[in-house]
Image: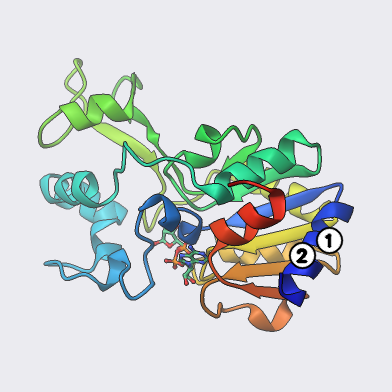
Amino acid sequence: MGTAMEQLKQWIEEGKRIVFFGGAGVSTESNIPDFRSVDGLYHQQYAYPPETILSHTFYIRKPEEFFRFYRNKMLFPDAQPNRAHKALAKLEAEGKLSAVITQNIDGLHQKAGSKKVLELHGSVLRNYCERCGEFYTLEDIMKMEGIPTCHCGGRIKPDVVLYEEGLDQGILREAIYEISHADMLIVGGTSLVVYPAAGLIDYYKGNKLVLINKDTTARDSVADLIVTGKIGEILGTICGIE
Ligand code: APR
């Protein structure tokens, strides 16, 4: 195990109130593409840039096209948690990790057994009628064609934060509380370029800020430890998850 891995392993062993902050790179080993890697969603060709399609304006003006892209490119109902998700759930079960804060909308942390998961950008597992508020599952949405419509006639909106939309203030407050009280903050699988999510790491006050990433990130310069590689392999190896 390299020195960075050994240092990470030691810090995790010492950790009593670890917080994990993650992004799409946590789910690529579950075969969900991330956004900004060379093979990521934002490097594929579409009529419009994906960030345009995944915006509130586009959702309102071109709902047919929005839902075609959303169903084809944002839903992975068969994806399974990988070693990273399982390692984090294990650390929480051992009482060492207090929260997972994620930008992902795939629900894989909960599927792996994590209990305290703060979903900054929402979840594809929750869908609500805009008119009557009725709840619909991911399966319901997958079964419907075109614009998902409630029995009341209202349009059903996925509970995911689109560009131009604000984040849930309660979840943001909770994420800030967890990070500001963490003895160790592990940031993994995120390029840290989308705000306000990326700005949350500035609330960490300790001296064990760890970045686990395949590539460099926008915040490498402020990390106390950088572990380069695949996060599923790294956390899986350290936490004994095969
Ligand atoms: N292990 C470690 N790092 C990985 C792995 C992996 N297996 N796979 C990918 N990465 C890294 C990539 O190198 C990249 O730095 O994870 C990072 C993923 O970055 P992005 O694709 O930008 O995803 P993310 O940071 O989550 O994007 C934030 O942007 O479009 C919005 O709402 C969307 O939540 C998303 C937000």
Say the numbered circle drawn on residue 136: none
Percent across and percent down for residue 115 are: 64, 32
Numbered mark located on residue 11 in the image: 1
Foreground pick, 145 / 241: 241
Classify residue 217 as left or right of residue 222: left
Q: Label 1 vs label 2: CA separation?
A: 5 Å
Q: Residue at x 31, y 43 (%)?
A: 76
| Residue 40 in view in this figure | yes
Q: Total number of numbered labels?
A: 2
Q: Are marks 1 and 2 in contact (CB under 8 Å)?
A: yes
Would you say 220 lies left or right of 229 here?
Answer: right
Q: Residue at x 74, y 74 (%)?
A: 4
Residue 189: where, in percent of width, then height? 53, 63
Q: Residue furthest bottom?
A: 221
| 23 in relation to 152, above or below | below
Residue 98 % position (x, y):
76, 42
For the residue marked with disc 2, what is the amino acid? Leu
Q: Residue at x 19, y 52 (%)?
A: 69
**Secondary structure beneath disc 2?**
helix
Residue situated in front as seen by the camera: 110 or 155:
110
Badge 1, how many Cα within 10 Å: few under 14, some, many 20+? some
Residue 212: name its quadrant: bottom right
Q: Which residue is mark 2?
A: 8
Dividing the picture into quarters, in which one does residue 179 lie?
A: bottom right
Crowd around label 2: few <14 · some 14–19 · many ≥20 (10 Å): many
Q: Is residue 220 left or right of residue 120?
A: right
